[in-house]
Image: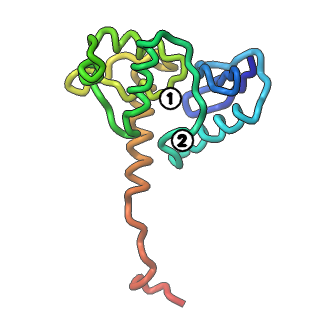
Amino acid sequence: MPQLALHTPLGEITLSEDSDAIVALDWGRGRDLDETPLLRRAADQLQDYFDGLRAGFELPLAPFGSPFRQAVWAALRAIPAGETRSYGELARALGTSARAVGQANGANPIPILIPCHRVVGTGGSLGGYSGAEGPATKRYLLELERRALAKRAAPVASPIGQGNLL
């Protein structure tokens, strides 16, 4: 299975590909590194994400999991960047329990690309996170997205009336 490791603000991560789709994102450096065009594209999109230039990803993803987990992961991908949903909200939408959503969320094999960090506890508490430094990583990802969205929404200043016309 081809893999590509890259440096991020969260440390090294490794992307894995199988059958022309991303199947895993792991914290740390993989051992079977073999860059492919898809892995390069995923790495470039992740770099743009960490640089605040991208809020979402346009990549084929194929996480391995039960139909229930697939449904939870699809719901995670529907949460807009910079926003959160509670485990309870997702559970109600999926007709299941918050605990079941939490277990599927924690089993997500492609964090960041499938944004499990956007799921929080009731009342906005962060809850846990299985990647890198745990809740601190979750907080970092949420703040990164909020800053990037705020930056994109900020109006661009016009040079007219600023005394610097030629």
Q: Which element carries disc 2, helix, strand or loop?
A: helix
Q: Quadrant of the N terminus?
A: top right
Outermost residue, front side: 67
Within 10 Å of disc 2 (Cα), the crowding (few <14, some 14-19, many 20+) is: many
| Picture coordinates of residue 41, whole percent (x, y) | 68, 38
Q: Find residue 23 and name its label.
A: none
Outermost residue, right side: 34
Q: Which element carries disc 1, helix, strand or loop?
A: loop
| Picture coordinates of residue 46, whole percent (x, y) | 59, 37
Q: State which tag comes first along the sequence, 2 or 1.
A: 2
Choose top left, top right, bottom left or bottom right for residue 32.
Answer: top right
Q: Which amino acid does label 2 sit on?
A: Tyr
Total tally of numbered discs in the picture: 2
Choose top left, top right, bottom left or bottom right for residue 59.
Answer: top right
Answer with left or right where residue 81 lies relative to residue 47: left
Residue at point 58%, 22% (across, down): 62
In this orientation, which residue lies closer to the viewer: 66 or 135? 66
Q: Find residue 112 and name its label.
A: 1
Within 10 Å of disc 1 (Cα), the crowding (few <14, some 14-19, many 20+) is: some
Disc 2 + disc 1, Cβ < 8 Å: yes
Q: Find residue 49 and name its label.
A: 2
| Picture coordinates of residue 95, whole percent (x, y) | 26, 16
Answer with left or right where residue 91 lies relative to residue 158: left
Answer with left or right where residue 137 lies relative to residue 23: left
Outermost residue, left side: 123
| Picture coordinates of residue 139, whole percent (x, y) | 39, 30
Where 65 falls versus 18 (above or below)?
above
Q: Which amino acid does label 1 sit on?
A: Ile
Answer with left or right where residue 165 lies relative to residue 125: right
**Mark 2 and mark 1: span between their CA atoms?**
10 Å
Residue at point 34%, 14% (across, down): 101
Residue at point 27%, 20% (across, down): 121
